[in-house]
Image: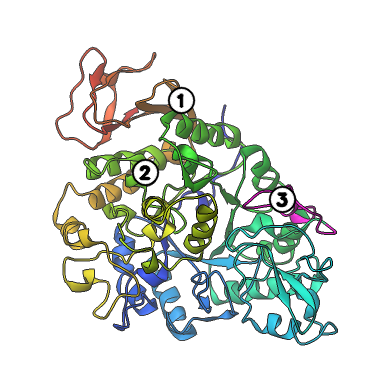
Amino acid sequence: MESKVGRNWYKELAVYQIWPRSFCDGNGDGIGDLEGVLSKLDYIKSLNVDAIWFSPLYCSPNADYGYDISDYRNISPDYGDIKIFKKVLDEAHKRGLKVIMDLVLNHTSDEHDWFKKSMESKESPYHDYYFWRKGKGKNPPNNWKSCFEGGAWEYNEKLDEYYLHVFAKKQPDLNMDNPKVRQEVKGIMKYWLDMGVDGFREDVITYISKREGLPNGFPLPVGCGMEHYTNGPHLHEYLSEFKHDVLDNYDCFTVGEAPRMTPEKALKFIEEGPNQDLNLMFHFQHMEADSFMTDWIHMPFSLKKLKKAFTAWQKKLYGRAWNSLYIENHDHPRIIDRFGSLKYRVASGKMLAVMYICQSGTPFIYQGQEIGMTNIKINDLNKYKDVITFNNYKIFKKLGVSDKKFLEITNRATRENARTPMQWSDKPGAGFTTGEPWFYINPNYKQINVEAAEKDPDSLLNFYRRLLKIRKENPIIIYGNYDEHYKNSTSLYVYERNYEGKRLLVVCSFTEKPVNFKAPQGFYLGEGKLLLSNYKDVGITNNGFVTKPYETRVYLFE
């Protein structure tokens, strides 16, 4: 099947995600900032990426580290100010790097002026910016549970009303049904786009429309009520409004984050044509290859589950919509600990990079992923900082889980594994800061750091550079179709790409054990050009080979 979707600049990008608090500290206060980013723009460009996605830089009390916004039009003093942001934006553009901002539209901080004014009285014009409701006797307005912090309602004694927060208590949900709120959103979008920003990643965007009446949800210990605000009744309408009134007037792109998303549901929002609301969609299905619904409910890693998720998105979107590709971000533990091997950290890191970047879609690389950063082990629950960790502690305690066991679970599952400071060198502070870092640095920074990787031509860092360069040079990797081979293998992930008479064969081993691989029917390895491999001594025997630990190869047939 030939793709009917057109070529576009956002499809040819590779995007580098910065979680600013942990990227690089430019002023020595222990917190990453925009001065630090400015100092690393040449490094980012050297990766062969084309864009930066910033996790929230806005003013925030940091109840959820920037995802609780108190001022959408200002930069947090932790990171700098508008002046330094404009300098970073300008310098990034000079280097040919696009800049994408995170946009959190489902909720604000309770310290935002809108919310403060909404609490002044029920007659305040801002009261209807949020979901304020009377309780039912001594109970909240409904039985919804927060994703982060117990019940989804918080009582205000002065107003004798509750406000809705489907995340933390300090993250009250915006009432997008209010046209004034939508006007505010459009104003925020215009503000940043007029400044020169190239697009938005829109946080939990599929939660912004709630079912009328806010009915009770199916009783669950976590996420109760989600069926009433996931892909809600006016979601398409509101996204279309933002696109028609603002986004269509700029050369920009959007990627929506969408929990519980499937390819079929995604097509309603990202299928190319007159009804397209977003350009790309982040989903979580492939991240459930070693878990059930959430990283906190661990399951044995299943390669077949991973392949099934990737293949579904590749096959069902091809020719109709565009994929987003990622294996790490700020919300998940490090991928080598999950789908790879700490014993074969570099080899498995290279294999995982090939596995997803050689698929059709726009790849996103998270800070530290390119050097193979790993999860941190912390020996005390009190040393954690994330609101999700605290909430899960309460839930697991009710289930009878001991503190010792919960610490084991947290070390494996917490998203704080992805938020340890970037490891730039083996110097004190890992080259991240000259001060006291805001969070713990992984002790392995002395071995795993950018400076060491730069000196090693066979490092994971230099492999990412080669891989992303090869992607740029071969349109088949960007625009080719996708077919999977050996679907039932529990050790190998093999797929082909086809485009304009060329074929690409991608082979990935997910085990340290040797596996006999034979090229699929129609492929003759001797006729292919080996574009990339994570081992130097490669050979072919009888149109196949025996894999080395976590081996990957990419062959091009012209």
Residue at 49% across / 81% down in the picture? 76
Q: Nearer the viewer, mark 3 or mark 1?
A: 3
**Residues at marks 3 and 2, CA–CA distance in whole angstroms:** 29 Å
Residue at 53% across / 77% down in the picture? 58
Start and end of the magenta stretch? 212-235
Is there a contact, CB below 8 Å, between mark 3 and mark 2?
no
Of marks 1 and 2, which one's residue comes earlier in the chain? 2
User: Which of 337/1 is in front?
Assistant: 337
User: Which of 426/163 is in front?
Assistant: 163
Quarter of the C terminus within the rendering: top left
Q: Read off the residue under disc 2.
A: 338
Dot 3, crowdedness within 10 Å: few (<14), some or many (≥20)?
many
The numbered mark at residue 231 is 3
Q: Secondary structure at mark 2?
A: helix
Please, what is the three-letter code of the amino acid marked with disc 3? Answer: Asn
Quadrant in the picture for residue 429:
bottom left
Q: How many marks?
A: 3
Viewer can see residue 274: yes
The numbered mark at residue 361 is none
Viewer can see residue 14: no
Residue at 46% across / 80% down in the picture? 86
Please, what is the three-letter code of the amino acid marked with disc 2? Answer: Arg
Residue 213 among those drawn in magenta: yes
**Residues at marks 3 and 1, CA–CA distance in whole angstroms:** 30 Å
Give left or right: position of 181 versus 417: right
